[in-house]
Image: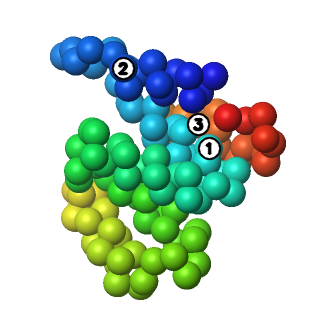
Amino acid sequence: LLLAANDAQLHQEYNEPPHWFMPLRHCVGSVQLQMGDAAGADKTFRDDLTRNFPDNGWSLFGLVTAMRAQPGTYTDEEIAAVQDAFDAAWVRSDFMLNESTLACPMFAGLARSPRAL
């Protein structure tokens, strides 16, 4: 259902304010990370940075988390570049992230189940 909702959101016409406050790609990426699909989360967060806003702190946090979860895929320099972009985007925030999204707290600590997505 989450993937279907994400697909529906991606195909909505532009509107101000947006129909949904938070991009569901953040939820999808968060669930992918929790399910051990770091490569899928990497793709999801990169897609959000391309479609949404290139300096989106939520997606940058998810992306750097996904990159770190894929040993040997990225160099330390590549990971540091994304971490620096997140730090710059989040410099004025009054709280620290520990999940890639707060829009989907119901997925926090999701058990590994193939049916979750």
Can you identify the residue that label 2 sits on?
A: 11
Q: Mark 2: which amino acid?
A: His
Q: Which mark is nearer the camera, 3 or 1?
A: 1
- What percent of the width, then of the height, locates residue 115? 78, 34
CA distance separating discs 3 and 1: 11 Å
Vertical placement of 93 versus 26: above or below?
A: below
The image quadrant of residue 13 is: top left
- What percent of the width, then of the height, locates residue 18? 27, 19
Q: Earlier in the sequence, mark 2 or mark 3?
A: 2
> In which quadrant will I find the N terminus?
top right
Q: Say left or right for 27 vs 87.
A: right
> For the point 32% across and 52% down, which residue is it?
57
Q: Mark 1: which amino acid?
A: Val
The image quadrant of residue 104 is: top right
The image quadrant of residue 20 is: top left
- Circle 3: is it few (<14), some (14-19), or many (20+) Cα within 10 Å? few
- Give the farthest residue toward the left: 16
Can you identify the residue that label 3 sits on?
A: 105
Q: Earlier in the sequence, mark 3 or mark 1?
A: 1
Can you identify the residue that label 1 sits on?
A: 31
* Viewer-side residue, 37 vs 59: 37
